[in-house]
Image (cartoon, helix red, strand yellow):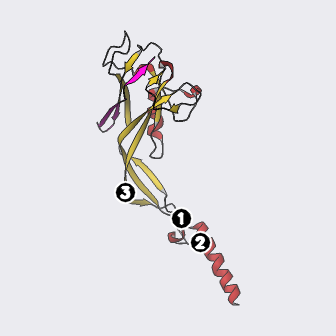
Amino acid sequence: MIKRILITLLVFHLLAIFQGCCPEMEREFRWFDFEIQILDNSGEIPIITEETNLNKNALGMRILLEPLMGYNVNTVSSRKFKIISECYAISCENYKFIKLHKLIAIQVITVNDYSENYPANSDITELFKAREINKTKSDYTSIDNIISIINNKNDATGSFDLFLIDKNANSGEHIFEIRLKFSDDIEMVKQTATLNLY
């Protein structure tokens, strides 16, 4: 008799663990900073490099957006009616991410004379293509499309790659400035280290 009661209790608790469900917590965030990593795009998949002497035909930049996270006090229950308590849930990291602003523009400015057609302080964004991280060369897309991809993600990831497609850069030292503009009038600006393109 005791054995049957123990088995019944064990089965109930196992069912509770598997059926338990956490509430969906809303987690708000905004981008507050970003990092630039230099990429060597000579292969099919770009690799991060510390090298500053780079072939102009293989220059890439990884833009790593950094989110500032917060919690909204509101929760959205993932079930309207529950027989089993939420305290039996296996995991309670069930978040609905809410962006407090959107990325609306990406600009690349050349600090040095880039070429005869693009003197220092020119906007050279049009000379770059974009890709999601770890995609192949066949997956190039436009800057506008990568902005749309970032804004439509349902999580807090927001990094992407930029690649120089133009082959007319002057040989020698170059610094590139990345400007990111957001829908709430926030603008973030950072520069690469000095790169020697050949």
Per the model, the C-alpha gap separating discs 3 and 2 is: 28 Å
Amino acid on which the number 2 mark rests in the picture? Ala
Determine the residue positioned at 37% across, 56% down: 71
- The residue nearer to you, when weighing 138 against 62, is 62
- Please tell me whether residue 138 is drawn above or below residue 172 in the rendered image: below
Q: Position of residue 187 (x, y in %)?
A: 30, 34
Q: Position of residue 45 (x, y in %)?
A: 57, 31
Per the model, the C-alpha gap separating discs 2 and 1 is: 9 Å
Assign a secondary structure to mark 2: helix
Tell me the crowding category of disc 2: few under 14, some 14 to 19, or many 20 or more residues within 10 angstroms, Cα based: some
Write down the region rendered in magenta. 179-198
Amino acid on which the number 3 mark rests in the picture? Asn
Label for residue 16? 2
| Main SS category, magenta section | strand
Quadrant hosting residue 121: top left
Amino acid on which the number 1 mark rests in the picture? Cys
Label for residue 93? none
Per the model, the C-alpha gap separating discs 3 and 1 is: 19 Å
- Please tell me whether residue 10 is drawn above or below residue 141 in the rendered image: below
Determine the residue positioned at 46% across, 55% down: 95
Tag 2 near tag 1, CB within 8 Å: no
- Please tell me whether residue 148 is drawn above or below residue 23 in the rendered image: above
Magenta span contains residue 182: yes
Magenta span contains residue 193: yes
Label for residue 72? 3
Q: Position of residue 134 (x, y in %)?
A: 55, 35
Quadrant hosting residue 137: top right
- The residue nearer to you, when weighing 186 against 116, is 116
If you read the primary sequence from the N terminus, does the residue marked by circle 2 or circle 1 appear first? 2
Q: Which residue is mark 1?
A: 21
Determine the residue positioned at 48% across, 14% down: 167
